[in-house]
Amino acid sequence: MLSNPPLSPTFFTVPDAPRYALRHVRVPTCLTGRSDLPATTHEANLSNVDLLIDHGRIADIQPAGAMAADLGPDLDHSMILPGLIDCHTHLDKGHIWPRKPNPTGDVPGASKATSEDRNANWHAEDVRRRMEFGLMTAYAKGVVSIRTHLDSLEPQAAISFPVFKEMRAQWAGRIDLQASSIAPIDIFLTDEGRRLADIVADAGGNLGCVTRFRSLPNAPGQPEFDVAMKNMFALATERGLNLDLHVDESGDIDARTLLRVAQLAIEVGFPGRILCGHCCSLALQEDSIIEQTLAACAAARIDIVSLPTVNMYLQSRTHGVTPRWRGVTLLHEMRARGLRVAVGGDNCRDPFHAYGDHDMLDTFTQAVKIGQLDHPISDWITTATCNPADIMGLTGRGRLRSGDAADLIVLRARDYSELLSRFQADRVVLRAGTAIDTRLPDYRMLDDLMVA
């Protein structure tokens, strides 16, 4: 009869030295930029290596067994990942569920509950504390970079963007923070759009909106849509901003704004980058529309971020009825067309998603299962690492290369099967080569804010 090993909070001790090696580890080959590293016998997308860390940076990567035993521990094929990156979340909404749940669990219920809570409670201190709670959690999970959307209907933008700038400065060196605005596209038919663009530019953010009207009918070919988007393109171009859009987040087969955004970007010659999130309805459309849309997105150099856990939670929801589709966009087809694709965590414990814990490793795990990104799993880990890093314009993030900061996640799992099968609660998170405290902040820290 086998006896269980004693439980411990970590499965190895990080050497207390400025220079040390983690020997006999496995890393995703696609993140090393190397073709000379030996592959594992059963997963060709992982390499067996020794990893040398020197004064907080990756100093060298060599085939396993190349480094002297006295340099550091033998980790028996444990996987190592770079710090993970979330390029689409909502830190300003996070953790309001206890005081404002969504009674229906669908998009209309989420929008109504969020609007009511925002109008009643989102003063600067409330946003600051909930945002910091989310950052503390993500940091403990091994997330190194986050782009958060900020609800931006007046007067909220003037409250939340200053808080964001404070958080960005406070968390510099721990989490790279970026911000994007989110508001109905209606505001770009008015002067509110210009005022928002100025706030975003002052914060060094990305100009964003939902490509759906709040006060007008939404239908293909709507002339007001072209006017609003062209105004948005012009405002962004004048200020040197990139765009970050919530697109076709519904099961409406007639929701085709992704195609029109791409066409307009080409028409106006928009010089910046465009990130489109969600794009759910594309998965329900005819093959001819899909082909036209993907071709236009490729021509416009549009990047895509899918939010699999939240889309699966919200889409196709009718009380008492089993959902008929997963709500996830066409990641396989997009990648095959050369589009850069990422996955993101999106909402966390708010009316748009009752669950979540700012854990990009869990997001990636769920994405693989929801989107069938396996058999083979290939290089899909790029959707939570180098792809979002490149989308966000970050250097030295999302890869495992000599000279990069040793901001790493060390897993007990030895391969993707083990990673995807068991929650990696005992992960060791390294920042600049030093193990951090991975204890999570207690929800009780926010109890006083949860009184409606």
Image (cartoon, grey):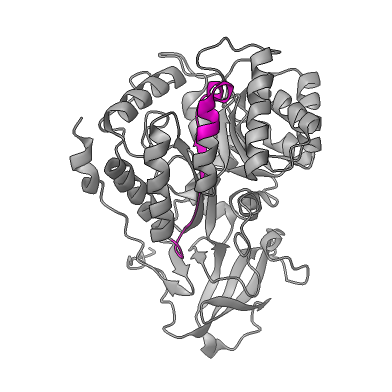
Q: Is residue 282 visible?
A: yes
Q: Is residue 448 above or below residue 379?
A: above
Query: For this rendering, which residue is in front, 328 or 387?
Result: 387
Q: Is residue 173 left or right of residue 220?
A: left
Query: For this rendering, which residue is in front, 107 or 372?
Result: 107
- Residue at image point 53% right, 87% down: 71
Residue 118 on image: x %, y %: 34, 30
Extent of the magenta region = 172-195
Residue 421 on image: x %, y %: 50, 49
Q: Is residue 46 left or right of residue 356?
A: right
- Residue at image point 55% right, 17% down: 213
Query: For this rendering, which residue is in front, 437 or 100?
Result: 100
Q: Is residue 318 above or below residue 183?
A: above
Q: Report which quarter residue 275 is drawn in.
A: top right
| Image quadrant in which the C terminus is located | top left
- Residue at image point 50% right, 49% down: 360
Please state the total of marks drawn on the protein image.
0
Q: Is residue 365 visible?
A: no
Q: Is residue 368 above or below residue 7?
A: above
Q: Is residue 389 above or below residue 329?
A: below
Q: Report which quarter residue 8 is drawn in.
A: bottom left
186 within the magenta span: yes
Residue 91 on image: x %, y %: 41, 43
- Residue at image point 38% right, 60% down: 170
Q: Is residue 450 left or right of residue 71?
A: left
